[in-house]
Amino acid sequence: MTDTSTRQFAVITGASTGIGYHLAQVFARNGFDVLMTADEDRISEAAREVETPGARVYSVQADLSKDEEVERLWKEILGTGRAVDAIALNAGFGTGGDFATETDLKKELKMIDLNVKAVVHLAKLAAKQMVGRRSGRILITASIAGTMPTPQQAVYGATKAFDLEFAQSLYYELKDTGVTVTALKPGATDTEFFHRAEMDDTKVGTSGKQSNDPAEVAQQAFDALMRGEKELFAESLTTKAAGVAGRFMPDSVKAAMHEKMAKHGTADK
Ligand SMILES: NC(=O)c1ccc[n+]([C@@H]2O[C@H](COP(=O)([O-])OP(=O)(O)OC[C@H]3O[C@@H](n4cnc5c(N)ncnc54)[C@H](OP(=O)(O)O)[C@@H]3O)[C@@H](O)[C@H]2O)c1
């Protein structure tokens, strides 16, 4: 699928829905051709929706929790003949519940494979190419959850803490190479995330309209990425305030607040 477009080229993982889908929309509206990737076949439908006049949109279906699928995705990216100007490492999922007695180890290990391993794998491939060209932008979707203890989402929170620290470290490591790295730290956002995490009976999972808007999260992330910012909380003032306040709060308080929102059965309390 070699292409001769002169527009910039962005790759977005987890682009079939939620934050990633809106990121693809924002990139396409702002002069980028985009390659959208996700695990299920609805990614082709999502790609059709993102097509705008002048923007070339590619879609690749790949399960990024598997090393060989990450490698296959990278081959598809190289196959376009396009240099990657920006990559949004956004695909991820969570799981909720008590670690010792409720959550499923297989699911948690797969989460680590997707939220952590695939992020490192794709960042390595993209950063090498970008440093070689002395140009590029990397967005890593972490979470406000990565800035606090997350009882009832213990493994998920840890994967997001990894993403955050990884992005921050790369930001400094690459700062003189022409490559920027931005960590996105959304608060609870109105996507399929909580349903997939089997958290429909939790306060955070049912916050609906009070949650952040994925389109706004994506817009703020894109703007911060273009400015080469290190990190951002997104998107509401409440989320930004909570992010800043969290720096001054003891872990015990943050843990208790998180647990109250994330525990099964807290939906109507
Ligand atoms: N929603 C929130 O409250 C929130 C808050 C902070 C951070 N985040 C982070 O934001 C990112 C996007 O989440 P979202 O809220 O937009 O959730 P979402 O609507 O559930 O979207 C998740 C995306 O990840 C893809 N994905 C899931 N498993 C995959 C796999 N094995 N291989 C490849 N792609 C896979 C999904 O594709 P398929 O549909 O094909 O499975 C989908 O495109 C995640 O990293 C999440 O941790 C979310």
Image: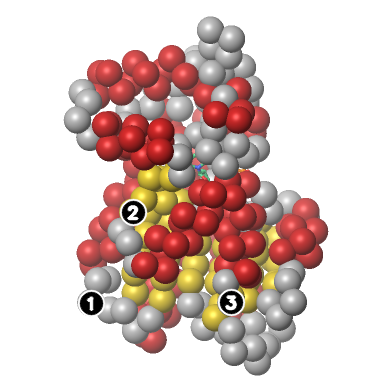
Q: Could you tell whether 86 is left or right of 22 in the image?
A: left
The numbered mark, 3 or 2, whose residue comes first in the sequence reads: 3
Q: Residue at x 23, y 64 (%)?
A: 172
Res. 72 visible in picture: no
Q: Residue 84 placed where, x, y %?
A: 51, 77
Question: What residue type is disc 2 on?
Answer: Glu
User: Element under label 3?
Assistant: loop
Q: Residue furthest top?
A: 269
Question: What residue type is disc 1 on?
Answer: Asp
The numbered mark, 1 or 3, whose residue comes first in the sequence reads: 3
Q: Could you tell whether 40 is left or right of 214 in the image?
A: right
Give the residue pinned by disc 1.
176
Compared to residue 58, the image places residue 150 above or below, namely above
Q: Residue at x 49, y 16 (%)?
A: 263
Label 3 Cα neighbours within 10 Å, binned few <14 / some 14-19 / many ≥20: some
User: Element under label 1?
Assistant: loop
Q: Could you tell whether 139 is left or right of 171 in the image?
A: right
Label 2 Cα neighbours within 10 Å, binned few <14 / some 14-19 / many ≥20: many
Q: Residue 175 placed where, x, y %?
A: 24, 71
The numbered mark, 2 or 1, whose residue comes first in the sequence reads: 1
Compared to residue 145, the image places residue 72 above or below, namely below
- Choose mark 2 or mark 1, whichever is in front: 2
Question: What residue type is disc 3 on?
Answer: Gly
Write down the quadrant of residue 129 in the picture.
bottom left
Label 1 Cα neighbours within 10 Å, binned few <14 / some 14-19 / many ≥20: few
Residue 31's disc is 3
Res. 61 visible in picture: yes
Q: Residue 65 placed where, x, y %?
A: 56, 51
Give the residue pinned by disc 2.
231
